[in-house]
Amino acid sequence: MTNSQAKSLKVIGLISGTSADGIDAALAEILGTGLDMEVKLEAYQCYPFRSKMLDAIFSAFKPEEGRVDSIAALNFALGEFFAAAAIHLAREAGVGIEAIDLIGSHGQTIWHSPAQIEIGGMWTPSTLQIAEPAIIAERTGVTVVADFRVADMAAGGQGAPLSPYGDFILFRSANRTRAVQNIGGIGNVTYIPSGGTLDQVIAFDTGPGNMLIDGAVFLLTDGKLRYDVDGKLALSGSVDRIMLGHLMDHPFIQKRPPKSAGRAEFGIQLAEEILARWSDIGPEDVVATVTAFTVHSIKRSYERWLPKMPDDLIVSGGGARNPALMKMLSEAFPHTKLYCSDDFGINADAKEALLFALLAREAIRGYPANLPAASGAKHPVILGKIVPGRNYGRLMDMWWST
C-alpha cells in the first residue's frame, strides 16, 4: 500500500521518562507505514505528577522500599493518570478522544536490567514498565500498544534503545552524517550515516543524561529542587577535574555497545555516593561536574564507538532545555553543527512521546521496529503488546477496507 492509498491515523504517544517529572503526551498524524511513513506532530503537553505521586514513584524505584502491593497499586494509579493525559491532550488539540485511532504508551520504567541475575534457579534479564494499559484502553475507548521493551529482550536484546527506528525516519539525510542525541534521564545516541540505510544505523546508551544531575540537585537542596532550573547551578560552578576523571572511569562508560543503562547505574544511589565521597566540593561545583560528566560521556562514546564524528548533532529531551549542558556540548564538539530537534520541527520535549506513537503505528500493522544491531537482539521483532479498546473493530476495518 502506498502512502497515497493509505488512511492516516491520529495516534497519541505517552511516556514518563527515567526523570519521572511527568507524562509527556504527543498527538501525531501518521500517514503510511515503514520507512516512508509521514509523521506530523499536531499537539504536545507535559502533565506533571503531583508531589504524592512523585513520592510513590521514587519509592518504587528503590529495591529496598518498593513493595509488591504498592507497585501493583501504582500500576493501576498510573494507568488512570496516563488515560487522563490522553483525554486532556485530545481535548486541548480540539479533536476529542473519540477521534483518536491508537495510543502508544511506554509507561513508567521502574526497573531495567539487561544484565542477568539469578532467580529461582534461573538466570534472566528483567525490565518493568508500569501504567496499566487495560485501564488506559477502558477509560479512553482507544486501542493501546504498550510494554515495548520486552519482545526485544525476549529475543536476546537489551530492550533499548528503542529510538533508532523513529530517529532514522525523522532525521536521516542524503548528504549529512547525523547523531541524534536524546538527553532524558539517560543519554542515548542514534548515529545515521549520510545517505545510509537502516542497517547502517548505530545506536546505544551513552551514559547519564539528566538523572544524575537531578539526583545531585535534589540531595544538595534537601528536596527543595528536583532539577537544575535553567542550568543556573552548573553555570555558577566550576568543573572539578579530579572528580570528573573519577566519574569517567565508571564501568558503563568503558563498556562496548550494545549497552543500555538505567537507575541501577546512574540513579540516586550514585548521587549519594558522589556527595559522600566529594563532600569538600561546593554544591555548584558538584552540579557543574556531574553536568560535565553527561557531556564527556557523550563525547567519549562518539570517539570510541562511532565510525566518525557527525556533521550534525541533534539534541532532544530535557537536556536540550539546559543552557549549561548545551554550552558544554557546544564546547566539546567544536567541529560539529549543534542543533535542537526543534530546528527540524520536532519539539525536543515531545520527541520521545512521538516515537512511541510511531512504534505503536508499526505494531498494529505487524511491522518489526527494533534494531538488532543496536539492541543485541537475535532478530527483528514487533515491539509492544496490543490491548484492544472499544474502537478496535473500527481500527481493523480501516485496514481491510484500504
Image: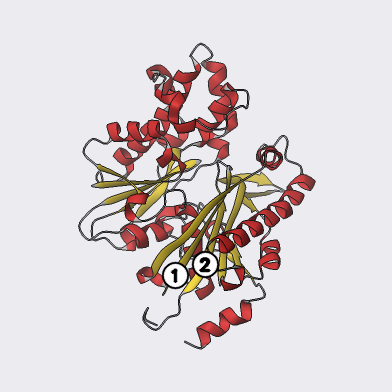
- Residue at 47%, 53% in the rendered image: 352
**Mark drawn on residue 379:** none
Query: Which type of secondary structure does the marked residue at label 1 adopt?
Result: strand
Sequence order check: which comes first, mark 1 or mark 2? 2
Density class for disc 1 (Cα within 10 Å; few <14, some 14-19, many ≥20) is: many
Quadrant for residue 322, please give it.
Answer: top left
Query: Would residue 6 appear left or right of 389 to someone viewing this image?
Result: left
**Mark drawn on residue 30:** 1
Residue 228 appears at what percent x and percent y? 49, 30
Residue 302 appears at what percent x and percent y? 32, 41
Residue 135 appears at what percent x and percent y? 71, 62
Q: Compare residues 22 and 309 and report the one nearer the observer.
A: 22
Query: Would residue 366 appear left or right of 346 to someone viewing this image?
Result: right
Amino acid type of the residue that numbered disc 2 sits on in the rendered structure: Val
Q: Compare residues 269 and 141 and report the one nearer the observer.
A: 141
| Disc 2 target residue | 11
- Residue at 51%, 51% in the rendered image: 158
Amino acid type of the residue that numbered disc 1 sits on in the rendered structure: Ile
Density class for disc 2 (Cα within 10 Å; few <14, some 14-19, many ≥20) is: many
Between the residue at mark 1 and the residue at mark 2, the CA separation in whole angstroms equals 7 Å
Q: Compare residues 180 and 9 and report the one nearer the observer.
A: 9
Quadrant for residue 254, please give it.
Answer: top left
In this rendering, is residue 247 above or below 385?
above
- Residue at 52%, 36% in the rendered image: 211
In this rendering, is residue 293 above or below 347?
above
Residue 249: tell me if it is visible.
no
Image quadrant holding the N terminus, namely bottom left
